[in-house]
Amino acid sequence: MSKEILVQASGLARRYGERQALRGLDLELFRGEILGLLGPNGAGKSTTLRILSGTLPPTTGSVRIGGYDLFERPLEAKRLLGYLPEQPPLYPDMRVGEYLRYCARLHGVPRARSRGAAEEAAERCGLGEVLNRVIGNLSKGYRQRVGIAQAIVHRPAVVILDEPTVGLDPVQLASIRSLIRELGAEHGVILSSHLLPEVQSLCARVVILNQGRPVHAGTLSAESARREVVLVTAHAVDIEQLRSLSGVEALEVLEPRRLRLRLADAAAAERVQQAVLGNGWGLVEWWPLRDNLEQLFLTLTHGEGA
Amino acid sequence: MSVTIALRDLRALLGSPFGWVLAAVGYFVLAWRFLQLVDVYQLELEGLVVQLDAAYGVTELVAAPFFGDAWLLLVLLLTVAVLSMRLVVDERQQGTLSLLFAAPVRSSAIVLGKFFGAGAFLTLLLLLWALMPFSLQIGTALDLGRLLAAWLGLWLMGLGLLACAVLASSLTAQPGLAAALTFTFGLLLMLLQQGSEASGALARLSLLAHYRPFLAGVVSTADLAYFALLAVGALVLAVRRLDSLRVQA
């Protein structure tokens, strides 16, 4: 791959006393990519992100950020990092603008440019109208956004976000997601979540953790390219005609007017829909099934208590 | 970087009731005490001095005793102990220590920032305290050199205690405990001299033994070095402590 590697972690393990919180994790992050860290609560997501942000040394393993070893050259490496911890590190008695300027200064933005940087980060996170409000008086959603703004105020190459969308309402959620996508285009983003749809909507690649161990690592696009759909029609359909359409890889009759299709791509989906409409079979429901990642994730999440 | 941290801390102290209440409470007690000293001088001592034609004046009988007063030392100690409830322990409580740890900032810069920020606040307080004895200049002639020396001693002792407060606040996650540690340690340093006049070794470690010469107007290298060592030693230990906090969970 010719893309620039921003983060390279190998053999990460972390032990808290007796408890092995993380073991055997390798990951890479390239510029222009969003990597999702998925797992049930207590799977080791926050531990991983704390290690990657340099706030917690691993028991074994190494992290390189933009070519610098995070624990041997911490100052150089951390200059390239922006980090939103699980609990946003906010000073409740500061004003939003003042706080963001302080964060910019801490990350080495020159004094003259810190005001501009703070305003830009606030603008991107939709904080324009609360710049002069005291952080302690803000709602949870706003505080979360101040936390995100703090992580991007110095325009770091790598942005690490620990559960960035917690506590946001649906409108804010959409705007934060588009912000993360934007960040992913120019920087590299690592985010954690325990919500699969969240990761699916944002990330090209995902690492699933369970009980401190990586159980799945791979791209999401390759999996979701094979789409499974449940089709419900008003009238009986000609199954052979549908099966003969190009791009229909499998067809299963669940009930007389309920079919399960596996499609190669979006064009195949369009052909099926046109066939249904053209023959007057009556399209009642078109219901995309998620790929086997969801299956895997659900198994893991449900197996958590066992 | 430490300047950035210091400025934020100073602003936080000046922008919150915490700093002002702390300043006001201490000032109230000290003003009361100062008034008592002036009263005693006016009602009792002044007549004696005139009768005996003694070579004492307001500087010796009001201003210097004010700087050496046990109540003043107690207020200073309490002020520093309360300040230690902010500093590092406050960052830990708010969860903002992770901001400092994730930023490209050395532990030494964090510790110095904390020390300078609270130190600037303490300096402002001590300057206000000094206004009381220096205000006597309006009515009489003071030995300004001696008073300046006394204030310098007070300032150095305050900064030495503050360095211990930075260390204490890095040792625990509970603000109350940090204050108790600072107070106890400071009190111990002051009490070392009591009853150990004979055994010189302990007395040499005492804060007061190195503070007294300043009250008499004597600024000696040994005393300056003592306060510098106290401050530097405590700050170095605090840096060590922060480094080990980074390694812990």
Image (cartoon, helix red, strand yellow):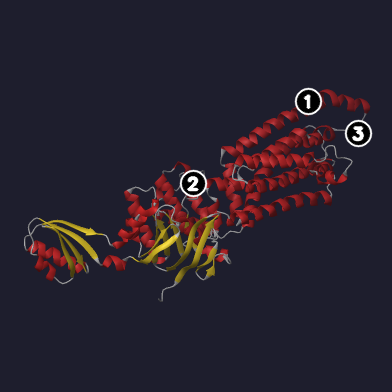
CB-based contact (under 8 Å), mark 3 and mark 1: no
How far apart in space, not on screen, are marks 3 and 2 (Cα)? 57 Å
| Crowd band around label 1 with a 10 angstrom C-alpha radius: few (<14), some (14–19), many (20+) | few
Q: Which residue is mark 3?
A: B55
Numbered badge on residue B158: none
| Crowd band around label 2 with a 10 angstrom C-alpha radius: few (<14), some (14–19), many (20+) | some
Q: Amino acid at mark 2?
A: Arg
Q: Residue at x 30, y 68 (%)?
A: A222
Q: Residue at x 92, y 25 (%)?
A: B51
Left or right: B208, with A257 as reference point: right
Numbered badge on residue B39: 1
Visible residue check, residue B123: yes
Quarter residue A38 falls in:
bottom left
Image position, residue A286 (x, y; %): 17, 58
Image position, residue A275 (x, y; %): 10, 65
Q: Which residue is mark 2?
A: A95
